[in-house]
Amino acid sequence: MLDLASGGGEMSELLQLTELAERFRDERDWKQFHNLKDMVVSLQLESSELLEMVQWRSGEALDEHFRRERDQVGDELADILYWILLIARRLDIDLSEAFKRKMRKNEEKYPVAESRGSAEKHDRLRKR
Ligand SMILES: [Mg+2]
């Protein structure tokens, strides 16, 4: 069984999760299969497994399904995160920094004054 015991103290949660994913991969000698193209394909396939859970469902029935299948939703989100962590590591991307930087970009793209309560894409937002 994998565990998170590292004694690091300073290590970020994201880094701990990345190392957990790498350990899982390396114990199985799977890195040899993890070329960038197939890693991105795998990320998309795992996203599709989550997407499959919404197929033929909507509204309250979908909400109820997801509440009932919360563990499976969590599994699929974890599968997606697994590939995100490994792709970021492969490209030496600091995910925490990348996320913060992108959120700042999103804030500029979607100013509260123009986007609050609107589902419009940024290029269609009306100046109010
Ligand atoms: Mg999956």
Image (cartoon, grey):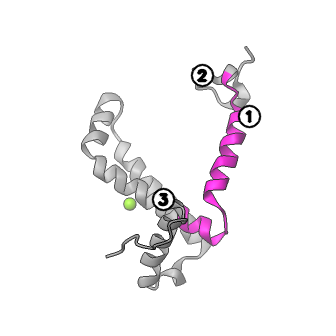
Q: Is residue 9 above or below residue 44?
A: below
Q: At label 1, which amino acid type do we have?
A: Glu
Q: CA distance from mark 3 to mark 1?
A: 26 Å
Disc 1 designates what residue? 108
Q: Is residue 118 left or right of residue 19?
A: right
Give the x, y percent position of residue 79. Answer: 42, 61
Q: Nearer the viewer, mark 2 or mark 1?
A: 1
Q: Amino acid at mark 3?
A: Leu
Q: Secondary structure at mark 1?
A: helix
x 28%, y 32%: residue = 61
Give the magenta range.
84-112
Do we see residue 41 in this rendering? no
- Overall secondary structure of the magenta stretch? helix
Q: Residues within 10 Å of mark 2 (few under 14, many from 20)?
A: few
Report helix, strand or loop for mark 3: helix
Question: Which residue bears the numbered disc 3?
Answer: 81
Outermost residue, top side: 128
Q: Which residue is mark 2?
A: 118
Respond yes or no on whether mark 1 lies under 8 Å from ligand 1: no
Q: If the image is split into quadrants, where does the C terminus sit?
A: top right
Task: Tell me the SS state at disc 2.
Answer: loop
Q: Give whichever of discs 3 and 1 has the lower sequence position.
A: 3
In whole angstroms, how far apart are the C-alphas of marks 2 and 3?
29 Å
Above or below — where is 14 with respect to 66? below
User: What is the three-letter code of the residue carrying label 2?
Assistant: Ser
| Residue 12 pos. (x, y %) | 54, 61
